[in-house]
Image: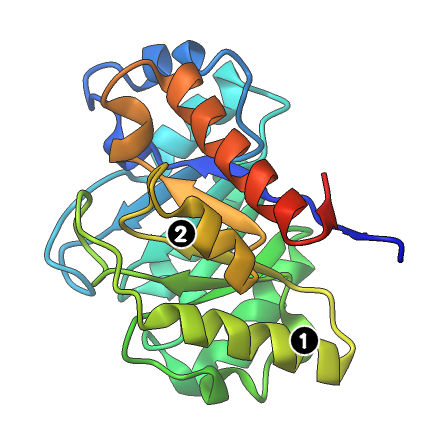
Amino acid sequence: MMSMKRRVLFAPSLLGADPLAVGDAVDALGGSYDWLHLDVMDGHFVRNLSFGPSMAKALRKRYPSAFLDAHLMVSRLEVLLPQFVEAGVSQITVHAETEPQQLHAVLSTIRAAGLKAGVALSPATGVESLRFVLDLLDLVLVMSVTPGFGGQSLIKAVLEKTRDLVRLRAVEKLDFLIQMDGGLHAGNVAEVALAGCDVIVAGSAVFKGDPAARLEEMRLKVKEALSDAGFGS
């Protein structure tokens, strides 16, 4: 029987890099990444503060061909959304919990700007919150930790949510990608990929050491697991 082929993408989270040397951290990856993941926190939706539009703009200038994946953990989307569009990111993911009544309009705005659009689900948020925006989704981000801080441990219960998304995607005949962010490292990325994750976000596990080597280790773990499960590389 012919095996199905699956490709898993890797998006290093710059939240895990030295904040005084983000560009150096990206350079240390040696081009081994698929996307660059930018966690944006406003101190309101989550308690922490991180990158703003100026960082996105600087990354676009320095890495003009990079796929910049912006994850907006913010409350005031009407203020920040246009700024990140203007900064030149490739994809914007917003939280289902931020403005649930406006989610369809927000995703439509992102797509109208020519960008990819995603929705993030915090650990306690169910897949049913996506029912009315499925046609606008390029990506669903499954948060496997509580949003707001790096370096947390994976909440394994979210693996079933990933499987639910795989089933929903098949039933609805859609092609959105499933991304996971939070507590991912070489010891658990294989399990995450086998659950159906298409894009793996890792910060601390990549940048606390040799970034290129650590990313390659994770990539090999996933490749081996998928091969053993009957998926081609």
Residue 196 visible in the displayed image: yes
> Residue 39 vs residue 201: left or right?
left
Quarter holding the C terminus is top right
Which residue is the site of mark 1?
169
Residue 36 visible in the displayed image: no
- Label 2 crowd (10 A; few <14 / some 14-19 / many >=20): many
Residue shown at 40%/52% (left/top)? 71
Q: Where residue 7 sits in the image (x, y, percent)?
A: 68, 44
Q: Is residue 10 above or below residue 24?
A: below
- Front in this rendered view, residue 230 or 104: 230
Q: What SS does tag 1 mark?
A: helix
Residue shown at 82%/53% (left/top)? 3
- Label 1 crowd (10 A; few <14 / some 14-19 / many >=20): some
The numbered mark, 1 or 2, whose residue comes first in the sequence reads 2
Q: Is residue 70 above or below residue 68?
A: below
| Amino acid at the residue labelled 1 | Arg
Residue at the extreme right of the image, as rendered: 1
Which residue is the site of mark 2?
71
Q: Where residue 36 sits in the image (x, y, percent)?
A: 47, 33
Task: Please tell me how many numbered marks the rendered image carries.
Answer: 2
Q: Where residue 134 sits in the image (x, y, percent)?
A: 63, 79
Tell me, for residue 56, which label it has, or none: none
